[in-house]
Image (tube, rainbow, N blue to C red):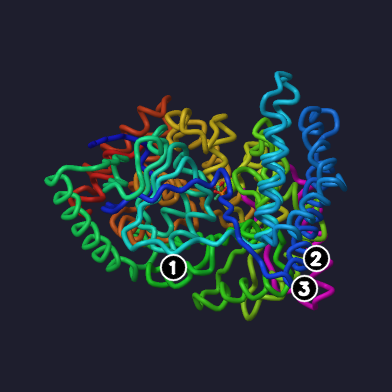
Amino acid sequence: MRVERKGIAISPGIAVGKVVLLDRSRTIVQRTSVAKGQTKDEIQRFLSAVMRSKEQLLSIKEKLDPDEAGEHHQILNFNIMMLEDAILAEEVVKFIESERVSAEWAVNSVLTKKSEAFKDVEDIYMKERLADIYYLGERILRNLHGEQEDIPDLAEDSVLVTHDISALDVAGYAKHHAIGIVTDIGAPTSHSAIVAKSLGIPAVMGLEDITLRASPGDAILIDGFKGVVILDPDEKEFKDYKKRKKDYLALEKKLLQYAKLPGRTLDGKDIKVNANIEITDELNLALCYGAEGIGMYRTEFLFTNSVYYPDEDRQLENYEKVVAALNSPQVTIRTLDIGGDKFPAGMEPSKKLNPALGLRGIRYSLQDEDTFRTQVRAILRSASDNKIRILIPMVSKLSEIIDTKRLITAIARELGKEDSWEIGVMIETPSAAIIASDIAEEVDFLSIGTNDLIQYTLAVDRINEHVSYLYTPFHPAILRLIKSVVEAGHEKGVPVSVCGEMASQLSCVPLLVGMGVDELSMNIHSIPKVKKLLNTITEKDSKKLLKHSLGLKTENEIRDCVRRAMVSKWGKDLPEEFVVEIVTSV
Ligand code: PEP
Ligand code: MG
């Protein structure tokens, strides 16, 4: 039966394919027999997974504030107790030996049996323990897999339909032929959205119940521009979307002509156009799409795809690839920004905590100094002829920068790399924006992370689709704040970049140019588009537009004013698709 749904347009493009329903909420375990001589290995795998699970839970517990985390503490204690329970371990071991099955199947069977004992009890507390058993089982199973769970090869026209998707799964499935992504929940600046956009996969999120409507194998159409999804389309729609897909691919080719343009306005103001990357697989694309440098390598994806953190050499291998790829003097590696909506497998926080305001970015790194030292060593060792730019995320106070600099300086001395690095700070919390002038005195560059700056300034969760209508870069508070950061940086002689999604929004670019931003860093697919726009507009007119916008009091007035001014001034010199994007921008 035909179903049409409107959600949030996340990543542009048209997809015509077949539904693949993805359920990542529970790991699917199949009964697998093992040879008699192999049971010992399975037991060992099981015991190691239990040990790793316990270590992870203890480390989560250690980081909790003891005064605030009462209920979470109880859950953790219950889980740790279960993991220490010799009887449980014995049962699993016996199951492996007697049934000659894999550790996964034994864990699944024993825990299922245990959970059945809780099913009929009336007591609420005991009922909640049932959820804990599922949670524990999932953790042990994930640790049994060790690395990221295997992603099966998909048919070439697969569209993933899922309740939610992690950024890592987006990257993983993109490699395995997924041509579109459709989800019940999600918002435009979530990390899964950013990765989908970067890899050019059409995506629509926030469709609420699409997983209940779709069945595996259903024909599905995605319009990633308007946020429309059609299941079981009629013949005419099917043909229409196929044609639109062809046209869009032709447009993408046309856009590539702009990749070679310099990052420069028509009246000669140079603005560097750099790439944000999440995985090293994107480097080739960055080159083809005309990136002038790497403005931000989000290293957390190296860390979140495994229950083990990568060691120094493994990180070095990745950072060296980035340094070597673009032949550019400017490579910016951002230190681990774990937290928010990015967690390593098995470390996701309780839903009741507020991870965006928690132990995230530099806060985490300064507490887990071993991990931070390893990363800094790898980054410094990757520096070759040019200085490597180290970017620090989620800074909210000056002492975080001082402590970080002290640590990097000491490591650089150990490695004889004293002159190989520069340091920059992400300005993405309101407090950092307000003290930007003091921060600028301590660093070599500033990079404004508008995704978080908007979230924290407007108090709008960037991954919550129910409040995405409030999330906008046109809010006067945002424009004034960004302008003040640019001025603060320039007064102290420090260049200022913008690396949030705002840098790639056509209707925001003239405002940023008007403010005097030195560099724009963005998802790879937007680079040619932004270069073409820069080459069409002038700094002089951008300044005028900014001045006029800053005189307005509401986001709606500012957005309408920008849309109108851009279309009347530059509309005739821009491709039609750009004009459509400008007049529909939010
Ligand atoms: C930002 O916050 O704008 C940013 C670039 O960082 P991330 O999106 O990774 O949080
Ligand atoms: Mg951020």
Where does label 3 land, which residue?
418
Comparing 100 with 378, the one in front is 100
Real-space Cα separation, disc 3 to disc 2, in angstroms: 7 Å
Q: In which quarter of the image is the N terminus?
A: top left
Number of disc labels: 3
Q: Is residue 490 visible?
A: yes
Q: Give the range drawn in magenta.
A: 397-426
Q: Does the residue labelled 3 lie within 8 Å of ligand 1?
A: no
Find the residue positioned furthest to the bottom: 385
Question: Secondary structure beneath disc 1?
Answer: helix
Q: Looking at the image, is 432 positioned above or below residue 47?
A: above
Where does label 2 land, which residue?
409
Q: Main secondary structure of the magenta part?
A: helix
Q: Which of marks 1 and 2 is nearer the N terminus?
A: 1
Do the residues under discs 3 and 2 have CB atoms within 8 angstroms?
Answer: yes
Residue 286 image label? 1
Q: Which of marks 3 and 1 is nearer the N terminus?
A: 1
Real-space Cα separation, disc 3 to disc 1, in angstroms: 29 Å
